[in-house]
Amino acid sequence: MGMTSVNQAVIEALSEQIVAAYCDAAGPADSPARARLMGDIMHAIEEPVGSRTLAEHGPERVNAVLADWEAQEGRSFGLRLIEIDPGRTVVTMG
């Protein structure tokens, strides 16, 4: 089975969805904190380059970033990533 690569535009779109959903639920974050969160999430989902790998391991990697961000910000919101569908460029948070 061949590996399908996830392009940078999809990674950016998925990251933006995650950050927007998280910050909408968590309350506004200052610009540097939001930018750091965006960068950390993009880095977390850039590593699993295949779409199947991203769907299988992406949520775990992103949730680790969210937990770390909460610890650094001193705020806990409990919103976590449930699913990534890179084919449709959709994330499910809950």
Image (cartoon, grey):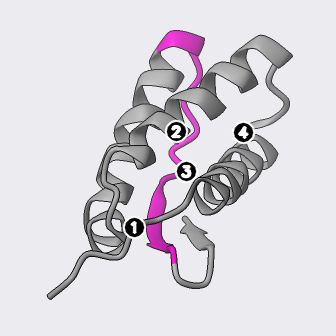
Measuring from the top left, give residue 6's x and y in whole percent. 47, 65
In contact (CB < 8 Å): disc 2 and disc 3: no
Please tell me whether residue 25 is drawn above or below residue 30 in the rendered image. Answer: below
Are discs 1 and 2 less than 8 Å apart at CB?
Answer: no
Magenta stretch, residue numbers: 72-86
Q: For mark 2, what is the residue?
A: 41
Q: Nearer the viewer, residue 63 or 77?
A: 63
- Real-space CA distance between mark 2 and mark 3, rounded to the nearest whole angstrom: 14 Å
Amino acid at dot 2: Ile
Answer whether residue 21 is magenta in the image. no
Q: x, y (%) of residue 63?
A: 40, 45
Q: CA distance from mark 3 to mark 4?
A: 8 Å
Viewer-nearest of discs 2 and 4: 2
Q: Are marks 3 and 4 in contact (CB under 8 Å)?
A: yes
Q: In the image, which is nearer the foreground, mark 2 or mark 3?
A: 2
Q: Residue at x 51, y 74 (%)?
A: 86
Q: Which residue is mark 3?
A: 79
Distance Cα–Cα, label 1 vs label 2: 18 Å
Q: Earlier in the sequence, mark 2 or mark 4?
A: 4
Sequence-wise, which precedes: disc 3 or disc 4?
4
Q: Secondary structure at mark 2?
A: helix
Per the rendering, the mark at residue 5 is: 1
User: Which amino acid lies under the numbered mark 1 shown in the image of this protein?
Assistant: Ser
Q: Position of residue 59 (x, y in %)?
A: 37, 58
Q: Amino acid at mark 3?
A: Leu
For the residue labelled by badge 3, is the local secondary structure a helix, a strand or a loop? loop
